[in-house]
Image: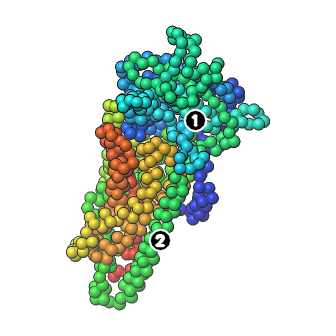
Amino acid sequence: MAGHRFDVAWIFSLVAFFFLRAHCFYLPGVAPEDFKKGDPLLVKVNKLTSTKTQLPYSYYYLPFCQPEHIVDSAENLGEVLRGDRIENSPYVFKMREPQMCNIVCRKILDKKAAKAFKEKIDDEYRVNMILDNLPLVVPIRRPDQENAVVYQYGYHVGLRGQYAGSKEEKHFIHNHLTFTVKYHKDPLSGSARIVGFEVKPFSVKHEYEGEWNEKTRLTTCDPHAKRAVTSSESPQEVEEKKEIIFTYDVEFQESDIKWASRWDTYLLMADDQIHWFSIVNSLMIVLFLSGMVAMIMLRTLYRDISKYNQLETQEEAQEETGWKLVHGDVFRPPANSDLLCMYVGTGVQFFGMILVMMIFALLGFLSPSNRGGLMTAMLLLWVFMGLFAGYSSARLYKLFKGTEWKKITLKTAFMFPATVFAIFFVLNALIWGQKSSGAVPFGTMFALVLLWFGISVPLVFVGSYFGFKKPATEDPVKTNKIPRQIPEQAWYMNPAFSVLIGGILPFGAVFIELFFILTSIWLHQFYYIFGFLFIVFVILIITCAEITVVLCYFQLCSEDYLWWWRSYLTSGSSAFYLFLYAAFYFFTKLEITKPVSGVLYFGYMLIISYSFFVLTGTIGFYACFWFTRLIYSSVKID
């Protein structure tokens, strides 16, 4: 059996590192850039996002002001899959040179433009921008705490409301932006680095005298008269043939925050204490249960094995009941063994991908400043872990006395990825039908297929070749030629019941963290507490292994030796509870109303749940595989 062995000192140092520093350091995606006074600062625009539709759109999908030439920034694979579309903007700042009431452009809305703005305001779309690799945020004061500020990523396109004395609801656009650029100044060189990018949006119906021309001065917002926009008392309505003038202010604030710590403010979670309490609570409960389970198992098994080995005659051995009696059938290959080999190999591929990714994340390589880095790393690690998938499936296949190793290799290389790719392709077609920037372009789709066929499949074959070439693992006991009849089982040992019961504990270990992960995915928040995630992952491994071993032991004690598939499904059934929780989260936390968005949510959660099934099932299977080999190699069988 291919096992994962860790150096104990390495594990202790990693755990110590986490507790000494809960908020991990990170290695930035870009090098710091120094700006002198008067240097131009280029503001870039990113996608429009909404938590109500989950469909991103490019910034210029709406008729905002445009620069002379729109230039796309080069995006990595992860950014494209996330729907990021980073482009230049008409906003140009100069370092440490405040600006007031800069006019960007004037627009007269036609019917199509007014309709587009209204739809995006109804769906609560936000505009995302970037300055020096920092996302634009709107500071919002928390009413329940003094001096507490939370940050909303991006500002809303507009809002709905009524005029005083009127019941008719109107749409108003945020056409005036007051930007605040925070910088940290180097006292020696005089240069500065950007450490914050904030905005306060306003809806203002700008007024001016005479006919409009390039030199027109506004009366509502005038830098010469030092008249600034401070409220939205006379808002700008969105209607056909209405005139909208887009303006902005820029303020610069010196900050004590250093460039290396500039992401800390963005990444602080508002409910950090709840998060800590929940994780520690979960950790204590699971560790307590694990300790009890381990103690009971060790004491019971030790007594069973000692008693069995002291029996002097075969007649006495035949009087024994329980797990010892099925030794001649316990290693009999299961039904659909090819499928089991494929799932185990894919699970090993997932386990390797997540483990390496966790280590990279803990070391700070997957910093949010490197947008799309997490998604890109996952894809590349998945592809390269095909080597271990092929090796694991081939080793198990040879144990089952299989001979056609190429057939099992093809199943391992294609079955799971093809299923996921088919679902992804359908979902992508739906996104493309909505003209969203979240639709993966043909070129990127081709690159994904190339990664799959060009790298992953050959690596699965290489792994399978070496795995099948090695001698088969010998069973600790011989298998009888004629299968033993399985006695009638108690109701609580029914396969469906025990499998469903087995998935509760692993799900219980992760569901608290799952809430934060789903919030980061579907409510567009940064998730960066990888220290918590690593501990939860370790807890998941322990609980999957122990609950499977316990139920496997009870199954063997009731003389049911069909444990192969049940060991996989026992811990794998936690994915069923994950999907149910995803449905609960959808109806209680999200405000998705459009059918397409609902299909996208459940489609992506189906892919995540399927992947979770493969991962947890494989952990449980290997734990049970190790356990059965251990106990049957410990008894004397004549």
- The crowd level at tag 2 (other Cα within 10 Å; few <14, some 14-19, many 20+) is few
Image coordinates for residue 165, horizontal then vertical, percent: 40, 30
Image coordinates for residue 223, horizontal then vertical, percent: 63, 21
Furthest-right residue in this view? 188
Q: CA distance from mark 1 to mark 2?
A: 46 Å
Image coordinates for residue 555, horizontal then vertical, percent: 31, 72
The reply to whether residue 227 is in sight is yes
Residue for badge 2: 288
Q: Is residue 201 above or below residue 397?
A: above
Residue drawn at (33%, 46%) of the image: 602
Q: Is disc 2 placed on a helix, strand or loop? A: helix
- Nearer to the camera, 57 or 400: 57
The numbered dot on residue 244 is none
Relative horizontal placement of residue 526, taking residue 226 as reference (left or right): left
The numbered dot on residue 198 is 1
Residue drawn at (34%, 70%) of the image: 552
- Nearer to the camera, 580 or 50: 50
Q: Is disc 1 placed on a helix, strand or loop? A: strand
Quadrant (top left, top right, bottom left, bottom right) of the C terminus? bottom left
Circle 2: residue type: Phe
Closer to the chain start, of discs 1 and 2, is 1
- Nearer to the camera, 170 or 118: 170
Relative horizontal placement of residue 275, taking residue 12 as reference (left or right): left
